[in-house]
Amino acid sequence: MGFEKFLFYVFALITLWASGMVITRKNPVHSVLFLVLAFVGSAALWVLLEAEFLGIVLVLVYVGAVMVLFLFVVMMLDVDIATLRAGFISYLPVGILIASVMAAEIFLIVGPSNFGLDAFPAPAPAGPDATNAADLGRVLYTVYLYPVEIAAVILLVAIVAAIRLTLRRRPDTKYVDPSRQVRVKKGPGRVRLVKMAAEDVAPATVGGADSNVGENS
């Protein structure tokens, strides 16, 4: 076993272990931290597969931005751990069934007979001028153009739906409605003039300074 294959198995085991810890930890903050570890292990696997661009993007985008956002959201939310744990046993059979179906699908697709060196031989090593970003962009926007566009539309719909679900009006919130402001018209109830008698008010003295000045003079 070469050193590269040894590193591959090490990072693969770390990724699998971290993925299992994500769904078994009681504290959601710990789950997020283990998910960060799983992303780092996946990025290392991408680097070993000579896909440095994907590995760097996985670390910078998901670990550096998305997971940090998830961590702050989880820490700010008042999550009721007891309520989350109460429904774990009731949904466990359904979860095991779905996990078994997914594992069977993965085995049928990535099995030795369908996804091995015999069916897909190792590609030739890339030259010194080859870049992952150029090759990935060329494939995404030529061969997989329609799937990329469909994924973009689905993500846009998901963003709009998330904004719509979180945009709630609270009765105790004070806000200004611009549409009501621009529709204002002059009328009897808009402005009210009040007549008041004028009174002469003597200037107030500050700290007795005026009286002291009069005595000195």
Image (cartoon, helix red, strand yellow):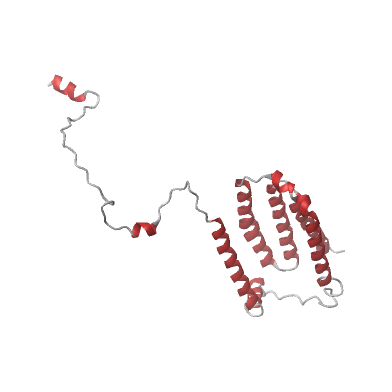
The image shows residue 123, relative to residue 76, as above or below, that is: below
Name the residue at the bottom extreme. Answer: 142
Name the residue located 19 percent from the left edge and 42 percent from the top edge: 195
Task: Give the percent coordinates (x, y) of residue 108.
Answer: 83, 71
Choose between 172 and 17: the one closer to the eye: 172
Name the residue located 37 percent from the left edge and 57 percent from the top edge: 180
Name the residue at the left extreme. Answer: 217
Q: Is residue 121 left or right of residue 73?
A: right
Q: Is residue 91 left or right of residue 129?
A: right
Choose between 23 and 111: the one closer to the eye: 23
The image shows residue 141, relative to residue 78, as above or below, that is: below
Task: Give the percent coordinates (x, y) of residue 160.
Answer: 55, 64
Q: Identify the image quadrant of residue 61.
A: bottom right
Task: Give the percent coordinates (x, y) of residue 199.
Answer: 16, 34
Name the residue at the top extreme. Answer: 215
Name the residue located 67 percent from the left edge and 45 percent from the top edge: 80
The number of discs equals 0
Name the residue at the front extreme. Answer: 188
Name the residue located 34 percent from the left edge and 60 percent from the top edge: 183
The C terminus lies in which quarter of the figure?
top left
Q: Identify the image quadrant of residue 67.
A: bottom right
The N terminus lies in which quarter of the figure?
bottom right
Task: Give the percent coordinates (x, y) of residue 13.
Answer: 81, 57
